[in-house]
Amino acid sequence: MVKEQLGFAFYVIFHPFKGFWDMKYEGQGRTSAALSVLALLVIAVIVKMQFAGFLVNGNKLDELNSMDQLRNVVLPFFLWCVANWSTTTLMEGEGKFVEIIRAVGYALLPMALLYFVQTAFSNIVTLQESAFYYFFDGLAVAWIVWLLFIGTMTVHQYSVSKTIVTMGLSLIVCGIIIFIGMLFFNLLQQMFGFVYTIYRELAFRS
């Protein structure tokens, strides 16, 4: 079963049109497999931050926190899924929320694999060859955007132009969600501060 899902994940990233079609209409792919790819990417990011060669690694290793890397990968993943689902629901998209999670999860596999290769490469590269290290970053982003585009178009049965518009609107919705979230936590913090001030005042007078 694991071998079958792993094989399908590799099939999707090299044959995205057929792969995403099989995922939606032939019952291929599992949500657990997509979330496993997400977990693999978290590990790949942590490994890259910790073990990339010193020539290309500008991170302060004693200040790195794995929980920050977990948050920086997992939150954008679910933020994009929610934003895309919210947008496509209003634009007659045929994809379900779980199908969006699967499509986005499988689309992350190239970045996870390339990060492991990039980290290993960074430890043998010279300063003159460091440009190749950053080439992997560009390749990973381009591959993910391509897979997200094909995945969105197939899952929701959109045309090319509607897929581009939908992905742009999803980015805007991501910004709106972040703004509302920050506003909510700011108000929550102020309310907590207000209640705490009243409590201290009452405690002082009693």
Image (spheres, helix red, strand yellow):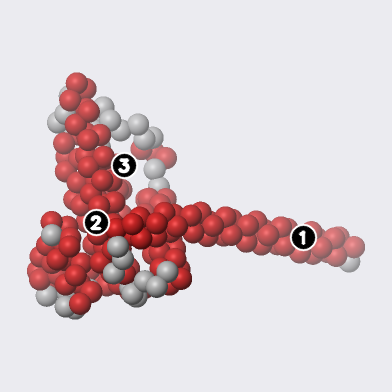
Is there CB contact under 8 Å for labels 3 and 2?
Answer: no
Query: Helix, strand, or loop for circle 1?
Result: helix
Measured in 3D between alpha carbons, the distance from the residue under mark 3 to the one under mark 2, in whole angstroms, is 25 Å
Locate residue 35 relative to residue 197 in the image: left or right. left
Residue underneath mark 2: 147
The residue wearing badge 3 is 49
Mark 2 neighbour class, 10 Å CA radius: few under 14, some 14 to 19, many 20 or more? many
Residue matched to label 1:
194
Residue at figure coordinates x 20%, y 52% from the top left: 110
- Can you tell which quarter of the image residue 76 is in? bottom left
- Is 141 in front, or is 124? 141
Q: Secondary structure at mark 2?
A: helix
For marks 1 and 2, the one nearer the N-term is: 2
Which structural element holds mark 3?
Answer: helix
Left or right: residue 129 versus residue 56 is left
Q: Which mark is residue 85?
A: none
Q: Amino acid at mark 3?
A: Met
The kind of residue on which mark 1 rests is Phe
